[in-house]
Amino acid sequence: MNYLKLTFDKLEVGEINDLVAHESCGAISLFVGTTRDNFDGKTVVLLEYEAYEAMALKTMNQICEELRARWPDIKHIGIHHRLGTVPVKEASVVIAVSSPHRKSSLEAVHFAIDELKKSVPVWKKEQYAEGEGCSEWKENKECSWSKSHRDNHIL
Amino acid sequence: MSQGHRSEEVVRVNLLFFAKSRELVGTSSLDNFPLATSGGHLSGSAVLGTICERFPELVAIRDSVIIAHNEQYCEDLTEPISLADGDEIAVIPPIAGG
C-alpha cells in the first residue's frame, strides 16, 4: 500500500511508522524533515507551506511507483507532508518505507526525499524575526527551474 | 485540420496561481481565461506570455517560473501544448517541499 497524505495537522511519526509496519518485514526506514530556526544568519520564527494538492498527490504517487520499480521487495510506503503553518522544530514531511530487509527501505527513503524535493509541487515561505527582512519564498536546489539549480548548470 | 491548416481558435482555460505568483496577482485562481491558440496548440512560453499580459505583476518572476498543464509540468516552455476548453494551467514558481 501507498499511504499518501497532505495535512494541516501535526505529523505523528509513530502513526506513520505503524501504517507501514508489516509482519513480513524486518525493517522500517523513516525520514523526518523538520523546520529549522535559522537561515543565512536570520532567525526564522514561522514557516508556511502550501501545495498544488491534486498534483502533489499525483507526483507523490509517481515517486512510489519509481520506488517499487527500483526496490521491488518494498512492502508499504508512507509519505505525509504537512501544510499551513509549521512551527520550527516540527516535522514538515515524514517518509516511511517497510521492506523484508533493511537495504531496500534505507535506500528507498533516501531516494524518495530527493525526488520529493525535485518534483512535488509544494512551496515554503520563511517568516523572519522583526527587523531581519519580513519573509521569503524558498527554492529547493533540487528543483530544476530554481535559481541555484540554474546558476550551477550555466557553463 | 486534415489539410494541416490550423485556424486560430480561442481556448478557455482555468488558471491557478501558487506561492509568490499567487501573492503577486492577489488571487489563487481564475476560470475561463482565454488563450488565442493555433488549432488548439500554443507553446508554454506563449501561454505564460498571455498570462503576464493580463497580470503584468508576474513579469518580475516570469523567467523563474514554469507552468503545469492538467497537473503535468511543462518544463520546456518552447514545446507546444495541446489545449482544450476547461484545461487547467498552473503557474509554478520554484518548488520548496520537504
Image (cartoon, coloured by chain):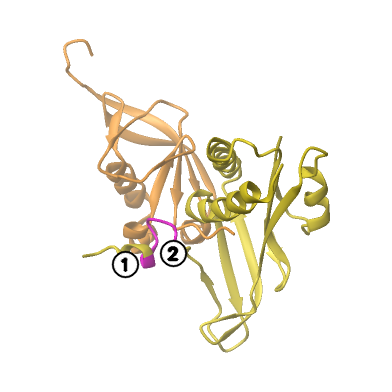
Chain colours: A yellow, B orange
Q: Which residue position is annotated with label 2?
A: A141
Q: Which residue is nearer to you in this view: A92 or A109?
A: A109
Residue at the image position 74 percent from the left and 49 percent from the top: A27
Q: Main secondary structure of the magenta part?
A: loop
Rendered image quadrant of residue A53: top right
Q: Which mark is residue A152?
A: 1
Q: Above or below — where is A20 with respect to A32?
A: above
Rendered image quadrant of residue B93: bottom left
Q: Is residue A136 visible?
A: yes
Residue at the image position 34 percent from the left and 35 percent from the top: B35
Residue at the image position 56 percent from the left and 79 percent from the top: A134
- Where is residue A83 shown, x and y percent of the image? 67, 56
- Where is residue A34 shown, x and y percent of the image? 67, 67
Number of labels in the image equals 2
* Circle 1: residue type: Asn
Q: Is residue A12 visible?
A: no
Start-end of magenta stretch: A142-148
Rendered image quadrant of residue A155: bottom left
Residue at the image position 40 percent from the left and 46 percent from the top: B67
Q: Residues within 10 Å of mark 1 (few under 14, many from 20)?
A: few
